[in-house]
Each structure stands twice: as structure tokens, then as C-alpha cells.
Image (cartoon, grey):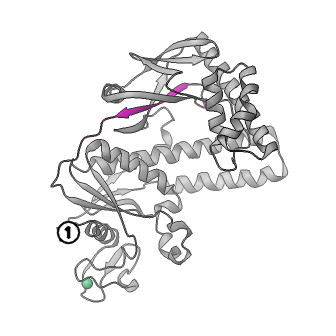
């Protein structure tokens, strides 16, 4: 069993939309109240915070379940970094959210609402497979559209045995290179990300001196835009990778957890996606998409994967001639550097032999920045 998030667009009536609006507004007010109290008391532990604010929240008109969710949202993070909660989302649990065919039933401030969902084939398929729903998060998009991110439980297939082991190397020039020969180029993704970052940094520095409403709003918009862009790119990338594998295969990735803090690895670290992308998030996306397809994911030691010769095992920094070229100073073996790294990763996960050196098939990630937040998340 695996829990995953399924994003569905809602089609509320005008009256329902008003009720949803009132609910997220009240929920945000509750979160902000809880946050204020937590700050004043220096108390972010969930159960202590519950004792401090539960009654206030109930008297604000929040249902018991929503009050618990608001406290959970404020209390769960260590020394909560949130400054303020925007009225754009609200968390429902199993008691306040349930499915009714192709509608979702939500307990709002205006009572129980049955809101129709707009489902595509993908969502229908996932809902048919779902063994249960464990609540979800209602969100309002930037253009006023409503979405529900459902937490569904899905039975995952037991992977058949005997598949191949495929290594994944993540880099800057190519976002992903698989030892099977497939490469996913970032296209304009990297420059777009850097552009968004720079723009955000610029607004950030201006915010220090001129704290206007317009500027704050711009800041929020930029953060949201960047978050959605990153999310969409990582989803697309993970999907490309997993779709190229067969059930029973094993995907080997580098275990980069904690690498960020290891200063000794900085030179190598600069090569990695996770400089610019949240690695943990990407890994969990990969893992759950792989699980659904019957593909195992294993993480291997990441040290020197780009410096080791797959033919003779000679490991030296000089083997890596450039960003693109690997040439072994021991035996003269030479190949695409990303492919060499991916092959080493596969071997560390038990792949035997180096396979045939196929010319790389290039897949491109469609330019995700043109897609809005309503694109499917999985
Ligand atoms: Zn060699």
C-alpha cells in the first residue's frame, strides 16, 4: 500500500465557491491566531499548542476537525518559519472529507457540501485503484480555481523478479542520464529556474527597504510561480524516467542525502541537480512513481561515480576530461561522462557488465513554464 496525492479540479457552484472561500478564510485566520499564540509563548509543540488555542479556534466558528488541522499545520514544524498564512488552502481529514462518486464531500463552515470534480482518465484510473481516501487539501489557485489534493491509498504491485538494473545520473547539462542510454535534456529549464531565482532575489532585497503591499504581493506570486515550476519539472522528469523502465526493473540512484552539508564534496556537488532542485522531493516522487509501476529503487554510495572507469576500475579525477567527456588514464576507455556515471551507479546496485554502449536517445522535457498549475500532477 502506498499513499499518494491525486490532484483534482473542483467545479463548485457559485454558492459552493463562496462557502469554500469562507472556509479557507476562517482556516487561515485560525492558523494565524495559533501562530501568534505559539510565537508569544514560544510553544510550537502540537499538543501543548492544542491546549493553548483549541478553545479560541472553536469559538471562532471552526469545526473540531478543522481546528485540529489548523493546530497541526502551525505546530508540526520546528520553530515554524511561516510568517503569515494566506487564505488559499485548508486541510481536511477522513471525517471531514469523503468521496461520493465523482464528487467530493467536504465539511465547511456552511455545513456539508458535495462538490463535483473534473476528472481526466488518469484521475479516474487512480480513483478506481484507490483503497481509501485519507483526507486532502483544498487549495485555491492563483486564478481563483479550486482544487482538491486527495490523499489516496493505493495497492502497489509486487515487482516481478529478473528485470535489469538501470543507473540514473543527474547533472546540469542533462537533467538525467540513464545507463540504458536515455538522456533527458533540461532544455530551457535551467535558465528559466535561474531567471526566477534572480528575480525573486531582486524583489527580496527591495523588500528590505520598501515594504509596500504591491511588492509583497509580487513576492508571493513569484514564490508560487517558482514552486509550481519546480514541482511540474520534477514530476515530468520522474515520469520520463519511470516510464522508460519495465516492471521488475531496478532503478539505481545516488544516495545524496546529507551531501549538501559535506563541504569536502563541494566540487562534485556543483554537478548535481539538487543544487538547484530539491533532491529529497525528487527522490520521493521517483520512489512512488516507481512503486506504482513495479520498479524497485535502490540508493548507492555516490562517491567518485564520475571518476571511476567502468572497464578497468581505475579511479582518478583526471579521468573526467570535461563536463562531457570521460577518458580513462589507465586503459584509454572513453565515453560520454554522464553515461559513465550512470553505468557506475547501476553497477554499484548489482548490474553485471557494462552493457552495450548505445548512442544516447535524447528526450526533451516540454517547456513546463507554459503549463499552468491545472496540469495533472502525476
Ligand atoms: Zn580504464
Q: Is residue 40 left or right of residue 17?
A: right
Residue 289 placement (x, y as % from top left)? 35, 44
Residue 65 placement (x, y as % from top left)? 60, 24
Please name the residue that numbered disc 1 is placed on: 357
Q: Which quadrant contains ligand 1?
A: bottom left
Tell me which segment is drawn in magenta.
Answer: 140-157
At horizontal 31% and vertical 25% (from top left) the residue drawn is: 128
Indicate yes or no whether the magenta region holds residue 98: no
On the rendered image, what quadrant is the C terminus found in?
top left
At horizontal 52% and vertical 56% (from top left) the residue drawn is: 191
Residue 368 placement (x, y as % from top left)? 46, 44
Secondary structure beneath label 1: loop
Q: Callout 1: few (<14), some (14-19), or many (20+) C-alpha neighbours within 10 Å? A: few
At horizontal 37% and vertical 45% (from top left) the residue drawn is: 288
Compared with residue 18, is residue 134 higher up or lower down, i.e. above or below? below
Q: Is residue 330 left or right of residue 237?
A: left
On the rendered image, what quadrant is the N terminus found in?
top left
Q: Nearer the viewer, residue 46 or 264?
A: 46
The image shows a total of numbered marks equal to 1
Q: Is residue 117 left or right of residue 127?
A: right
The answer to whether residue 58 shows anywhere in this view is yes
Compared with residue 152, is residue 239 higher up or lower down, i.e. above or below? below
Q: Nearer the viewer, residue 45 or 270?
A: 45
The answer to whether residue 85 shows anywhere in this view is no
User: Residue most toward the bottom?
Assistant: 330
Q: Nearer the viewer, residue 135 or 141?
A: 135
Amino acid at each position: 500500500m502506498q499513499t499518494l496525492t491525486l490532484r483534482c479540479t473542483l467545479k463548485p457552484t457559485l454558492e459552493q465557491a463562496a462557502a469554500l472561500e469562507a472556509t479557507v478564510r476562517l482556516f487561515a485566520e485560525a492558523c494565524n491566531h495559533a501562530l501568534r499564540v505559539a510565537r508569544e509563548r514560544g510553544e510550537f509543540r502540537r499538543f501543548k499548542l492544542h491546549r493553548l488555542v483549541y478553545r479560541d479556534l472553536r469559538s471562532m466558528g471552526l469545526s473540531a476537525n478543522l481546528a485540529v488541522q489548523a493546530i497541526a499545520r502551525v505546530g508540526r514544524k520546528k520553530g515554524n518559519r511561516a510568517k503569515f498564512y494566506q487564505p488559499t488552502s485548508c486541510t481536511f481529514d477522513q471525517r471531514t472529507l469523503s468521496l461520493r462518486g465523482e464528487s467530493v464531500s467536504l465539511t465547511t463552515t456552511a455545513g456539508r457540501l458535495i462538490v463535483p470534480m473534473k476528472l481526466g482518465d488518469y484521475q479516474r484510473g487512480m480513483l478506481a485503484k484507490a483503497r481509501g481516501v485519507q483526507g486532502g487539501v483544498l487549495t485555491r489557485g492563483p486564478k481563483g480555481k479550486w482544487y482538491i489534493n486527495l490523499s489516496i491509498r493505493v495497492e502497489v504491485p509486487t515487482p516481478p523478479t529478473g528485470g535489469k538494473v538501470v543507473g540514473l545520473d543527474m547533472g546540469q547539462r542533462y537533467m538525467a542520464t540513464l545507463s540504458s542510454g536515455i538522456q533527458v535534456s533540461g532544455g530551457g529549464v535551467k535558465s528559466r529556474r535561474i531567471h526566477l531565482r534572480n528575480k525573486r532575489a531582486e524583489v527580496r532585497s527591495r523588500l528590505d527597504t520598501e515594504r509596500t503591499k504591491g511588492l509583497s504581493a509580487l513576492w508571493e506570486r513569484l514564490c508560487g510561480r517558482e514552486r509550481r515550476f519546480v514541482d511540474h519539472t520534477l514530476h515530468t522528469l520522474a515520469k520520463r524516467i519511470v516510464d522508460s523502465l519495465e516492471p521488475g526493473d531496478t532503478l539505481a540512484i545516488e544516495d545524496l542525502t546529507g551531501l549538501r552539508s559535506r563541504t569536502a564534496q563541494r566540487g562534485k556537488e556543483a554537478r548535481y541537480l539538487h543544487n538547484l532542485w530539491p533532491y529529497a522531493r525528487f527522490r520521493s516522487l521517483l520512489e512512488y512513481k516507481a512503486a506504482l509501476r513495479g520498479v524497485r529503487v535502490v540508493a548507492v554510495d555516490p562517491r567518485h561515480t564520475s571518476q571511476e572507469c567502468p572497464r578497468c576500475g581505475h579511479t582518478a579525477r583526471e579521468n573526467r576530461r570535461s563536463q562531457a567527456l570521460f577518458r580513462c588514464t589507465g586503459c584509454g576507455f572513453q565515453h560520454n561522462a554522464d553515461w559513465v556515471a550512470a553505468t557506475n551507479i547501476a553497477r554499484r546496485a548489482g548490474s553485471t557488465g557494462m552493457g552495450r554502449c548505445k548512442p544516447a536517445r535524447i528526450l526533451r522535457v516540454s517547456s513546463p513554464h507554459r503549463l499552468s498549475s491545472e496540469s495533472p500532477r502525476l
